[in-house]
Image: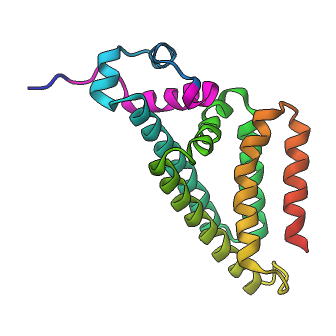
Amino acid sequence: MGRNKEFDTKLVLHKAMEVFGHYGYEGTSLKQLLDGLGIARQSLYDTYGTKRDLFISALKHYVTAKSDDVISYLTTSNSVKQGISDVFYEGASVLKDENRRKECFILYSAFDRMPHDTEVAEFLTKDLKRLEDVFYETLVRGQKQGEINQRQELRAFARYLNYSRHSMTQLAKITNDPKVLDDYVKVTLSNLDN
């Protein structure tokens, strides 16, 4: 009979997001992982497998939860413009918070891994397409409701919004200035009025 795990596996995934987010995948040593996770080496291997396996588990956990939240919010928001604005401002709010932003930087590491890891590339490509489709459906609804200009090329605009949202993570990685994030969001969202 197997022993019960003596740690919360979801909490460990959250801690892994922070460690990988801080050091990057390549820069994270086994010692940094074990120190950051607060678990023994054997527990890491028994529960998650290799460093790569843990990275992919943490990445999938993070991306799936964040994307599900965005999709839920966009599909239930009465006002399309307000819904899209809220998604961007919430993203900026997270990235301006020292504690919450650490987890987000796993995404930065994941994009670095895409050219070298087909599983990461396939997962992120699928998720990006899923979000693009939801932005597109949201914009179509916005046109029908009269909130979005009829002249907009909606598929291209959906792609732009989706990649702009992800680009905020990279921006937050290179600057700690909250005004830069606020300006980025403001300029991005100004396209909703064109």
Is residue 102 visible in this depiction of the protein? Answer: yes
Residue name at image x 74 percent, y 78 percent: 154
Picture quadrant of residue 71: bottom right
Magenta region, mostly helix, strand or loop? helix
- Asked if 58 appears above or below 123 in the picture, the reply is above
- Quadrant placement of the N terminus: top left
In the rendered image, the vertical position of residue 138 relative to residue 165, given as above or below: below
- Residue 79 makes an appearance in the image: no
Q: Residue 44 in the image: x percent, y percent?
A: 35, 23
Residue 148 position in % (x across, y down): 81, 78
Which residue is at 37% across, 27% downward?
8
Residue 133 in the image, given as x and y percentages of width and height: 60, 71
Name the outermost residue toward the front. 116
Please check the rendered image and state whether residue 23 is part of the magenta-colored stretch, yes or no.
yes
Above or below residue 36? Residue 10 is below
Q: Is residue 125 above or below residue 46?
A: below
Determine which quarter of the picture holds residue 129. Answer: bottom right
The image quadrant where one finds the C terminus is: bottom right
The image quadrant that residue 45 belongs to is top left
User: 92 or 119, which lies in front?
Assistant: 119
In this view, the residue in front, 65 or 30, is: 30
What residue occupies the far left of the structure in this picture? 1
Q: Is residue 145 left or right of residue 23?
A: right
Q: How is the image coloured?
A: rainbow
| Residues shaded magenta | 4-26
Residue 126 image point, x, y percent: 51, 61
Tell me what residue is drawn at x 73 percent, y 38 percent: 95
Q: How many marks?
A: 0
Residue 20 is inside the magenta segment: yes
